[in-house]
Amino acid sequence: MKKNQNQLVLVAVVSLAVLSMSFINFYSTIEPWKAPASAKTIKNPLKGNVQATKEGKKLYDSMCAVCHGNKGRGDGVAGMALNPRPANFTKSVVQDQTDGEIYWKITNGRLPMAAYKDILTEEQRWQLVNYLRTFKK
Ligand code: HEC
């Protein structure tokens, strides 16, 4: 009897610990990433430029697909264990943003995603914005 009670207490303590950890995890991932209002109106100089979209695909396949997946679904092999998970570009939460906001996010990054400001030129970042639009459902 005594032994059973001890086991019960142990199970309760462990459950509580697991529960509180998942709460912490939940609340630390929930905050959505928002670009500042000033990013909204940045104009895409390559809008509708088909050649730029092609260049964007090349860049995407070599630099972004590893986390965001070949089809932009956020399911790349290197993204599986990340917290937060890589964005799914087929979703309206992404596609409803302006080109300027998406450009701003690629430029500035947010951990675990790097900032591409010093890695890619402005032109390359806009080429990527064009390509990300092709994932729209
Ligand atoms: C190391 C993995 C990794 C790589 C490589 C990576 N990303 Fe990301 N990306 C992420 C993660 C994780 C998020 C989610 C960040 C968040 O919500 O705080 C994200 C978010 C984004 C977003 C924001 C989506 C939104 O609206 O919230 C854009 C845009 C984006 N990535 C574009 C790119 C592009 C373009 C590349 C390639 C140049 C790239 N990413 C490479 C991991 C990665």
Image (cartoon, rainbow, N blue to C red):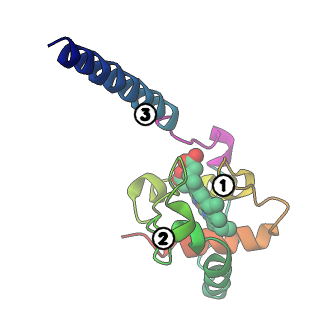
**Badge 1 amino acid:** Met
Q: x, y (%) of residue 78?
A: 57, 66
Instruction: List the residue tagged with mark 1.
Output: 113
**Badge 3 amino acid:** Phe
Q: Is residue 130 magenta?
A: no
Q: Residue at 66% x, 47% y: name it.
A: 111
Residue nearest the observer in this picture, 17 or 131: 17
Q: Magenta stretch: give its range.
A: 30-40
**Badge 2 amino acid:** Gly
Q: What quarter of the picture does the C terminus occupy?
A: bottom left
Asked if the residue at tag 2 contacts the one at tag 1, i.e. Cβ–Cβ closer than 8 Å, the answer is no
Q: CA distance from mark 1 to mark 3?
A: 19 Å
Q: For residue 72, say whether it is visible.
A: yes
Q: Under tag 1, what secondary structure? A: loop
Above or below, 55 against 131 in this view is below
Q: Quadrant of residue 6?
A: top left
Q: For residue 99, say whether it is visible.
A: no
Marked residue nearer the N-terminal end (1 or 3):
3
Q: Under tag 3, what secondary structure? A: helix
Q: In this image, 6 relative to 75: left or right?
A: left
Q: In this image, 45 relative to 25: left or right?
A: right
Q: Under tag 2, what secondary structure? A: loop
Instruction: List the residue tagged with mark 2.
Output: 72
Instruction: List the residue tagged with mark 3.
Output: 26
Q: Is mark 1 within 8 Å of ligand 1?
A: yes
| Circle 2 crowding by C-alpha within 10 Å: few under 14, some 14–19, many from 20 | many
Above or below, 54 against 137 in this view is below
Look at discs 3 and 2 and give the one toward the viewer.
3
